[in-house]
Amino acid sequence: MSRATNRDNNAGIPFQVSHEQQSCHLLELSPPLLALLSSKHPPTGGTSSVGSPSPTNALLCTDDQTFQIRQVQSSNSIFVIQPAQDTIPLHHGQPAGVSAIAQCKSTLELIPIPIPSSATLYLKSSINAYDEFQGSTKPPSTTRPKEKKTQLSLSIEAPMSAKEFDEGWNKLCAFELDGQAWIPTAGVLLGTWKSFFAIATLEGLNLQTAFHISSIAKKAEEDGYPEPLFLAMINMLKVNDVDAMDGWATLSEETSTTWVGVSLLESKKRSDREILMSKLLHEWQDMLPELWRRRVSTKLLEGKYVQLSEGFIGFEGGFDDSTLSDGPQPASTKAVRKWHEKFKNNRR
């Protein structure tokens, strides 16, 4: 036991360094995180290195936020101390000494990670695309199909909190079918919306009020769009305080209008190198209820396209002529749209 003491009562607290040093790491907590951990109901969390920026990086996940753990070297001498238990005789009035049980040459700091984009990138890199192709022959895939995984297995492996995973899952309209997770392409999503909008129009549904979606989901499935896919789309577009999984939904006019426009634009990325903006806007309006069409504007598509020439636009990031990984094709709508005939018979 080494000692650094001074018998002058006014010289300070006796200090000693223990020969048996303990292993210790200091974690720097921001005030918000410290308040969260010291609250009456602290979150449960864990660490993960799956999907982190490099194999040496670890992540700390709370219930709703993700932090990257980074080691920072320190030029200062940082000691972890505890009250000394022996050896230094105390003079009258002299405070008890302290003993250094560990020395930390580095600290760990937590850096918040902007997960919304990271969540979608993780899911896109882990899940096969649910795609459809024009014609009867599917072109060969240029990418190797990803390993088949379920939503549960993906969430367990995800380098992010459960809340952030769910937000990314909902944003992509991801769904599970036959024990496998899928991400629908823009073309499939647009086709699902068209089917839904056609059914709603024929049945006279007001999309701004709550409607029961079970019967609509079944008719959309006859159009070739599985019920889990249909529910994922409705869940993405619903008003926040309504749960589509309970069988009822009220769509958000603002969210739905923007989403249809973006999906329409994205669906053309693999077929058109340039688009006439006026034609796109008219096509977009035709896919919406009449009262929603006033919202259609190029401002809702900002960041999604580039101006090529007067009146014509291209795609941010360039034209995409690649094919996606193998995925199932929705059933041909030419043979399965039985609900249309049923609707006609009911009106006779």
Image (cartoon, rainbow, N blue to C red):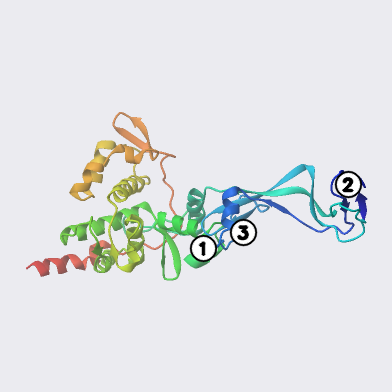
Q: Is residue 21 left or right of residue 198?
A: right
Dot 2 falls on a residue whose secondary structure is loop
User: Which amino acid type is shown beneath numbered disc 2?
Assistant: Asn
Dot 2 alpha-carbon crowd within 10 angstroms: few under 14, some 14 to 19, many 20 or more? some
Choose between 99 and 65: the one closer to the eye: 99
Q: The residue tagged with tag 3: helix, strand or loop?
A: strand
From the top left corner, tell me how far across and down residue 49 is, in percent.
63, 57
Answer with left or right where residue 43 lies relative to residue 249: right
Residue at mark 1 to residue at mark 2: CA–CA distance: 60 Å
| Depth order, front residue of 245/36 | 36
Q: Which mark is residue 155?
A: 1
Residue depicted at x 19% and y 57% = 206
| Residue 144 pos. (x, y %) | 51, 58
Tell me which numbered mark, 3 or 1, is placed earlier along the sequence.
3
- Residue 59 in the image: above or below residue 151: above
The CA span between labels 3 and 1 is 12 Å
Q: Residue at x 51, y 57 (%)?
A: 64
Question: For residue 48, which numbered disc appears in the image?
Answer: 3
Q: If the image is split into quadrants, where does the C terminus sit?
A: bottom left
Q: Quadrant of the N terminus?
A: bottom right
- Packing grade of label 1 (10 A; few <14, some 14-19, many >=20) is some
Which is more foreground, mark 1 or mark 2?
2
Q: CA distance from mark 2 to mark 3?
A: 50 Å
Where residue 10 sits in the image (x, y, percent)?
A: 86, 44
Q: Earlier in the sequence, mark 2 or mark 3?
A: 2
Q: Quadrant of residue 245?
A: bottom left
Do callouts 1 and 2 mark residues in contact (Cβ within 8 Å)?
A: no
- The residue at which mark 2 appears reads as 9
Nearer to the camera, 259 or 112: 112
Q: Amino acid at mark 3?
A: Ser
